[in-house]
Image (cartoon, rainbow, N blue to C red):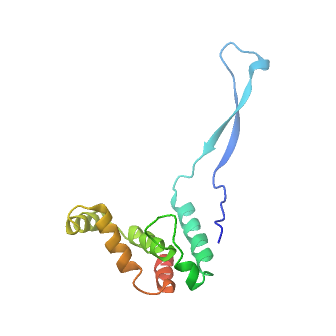
Amino acid sequence: MPVKAKARFTTHEKAVVREGAGPATMGAEKEPLMAESPWPAIHAERKALADDLAGLTAEQWATPSLCSRWTVHQVLAHQVATARMTPAKFVTKMAAARFNFTRMSDKDVSAGSAGVPAGTLEDFRS
């Protein structure tokens, strides 16, 4: 299923006057406008992703992802695990994994993808 990419940033133009320059050297410069908070865009993207994933078949959920060791279902489980991570949980889980980040991530992914994809998707939506 192709990913739908949407531009989230807008630009505005402002006149730039170079010191000692006349109208012939005035130009337009584009500056990105950033939202005060990234969270509205993050929530919108997560909702769009969840909506796209809702229509996947069992075979598509089991498809290898671009994360070479994980399926699509496991990548979603990873996203759920990282969304729920706090600094205290991170330190505790890293210590339990003997400070091996891959081991910690694999354990979270294994736990998060133990059920059916619909359950993981519901966790992602909440």
Query: Which residue occupies the foreground of this view, 34 or 60?
Result: 60
The answer to whether residue 19 is left or right of residue 72 is right
x, y percent for residue 111: 35, 79
The answer to whether residue 29 is left or right of residue 38 is right
> In the rendered image of this protein, does residue 118 appear above or below residue 101?
below
The answer to whether residue 17 is left or right of residue 46 is right
> In the rendered image of this protein, does residue 123 appear above or below residue 44?
below
> In the rendered image of this protein, does residue 7 appear above or below residue 115?
above
The answer to whether residue 107 is left or right of residue 47 is left
Q: Which residue is drawn at the image coordinates 63% and 51% (left, top)? A: 9
x, y percent for residue 105: 34, 68
x, y percent for residue 85: 35, 68
Query: Which residue occupies the foreground of this view, 36 or 50?
Result: 50
x, y percent for residue 116: 47, 87
**Residue that protrudes farthest toward the top in the picture:** 20
| Residue 19 found in image quarter | top right
| Residue 14 found in image quarter | top right
> In the rendered image of this protein, does residue 65 appear above or below residue 7?
below
For the image shown, how many numbered marks are present on the structure?
0
Q: Which residue is drawn at the image coordinates 38% and 74% (left, top)? A: 109
Q: Which residue is drawn at the image coordinates 58% and 76% (left, top)? A: 53
Q: Quadrant of the N terminus?
A: bottom right
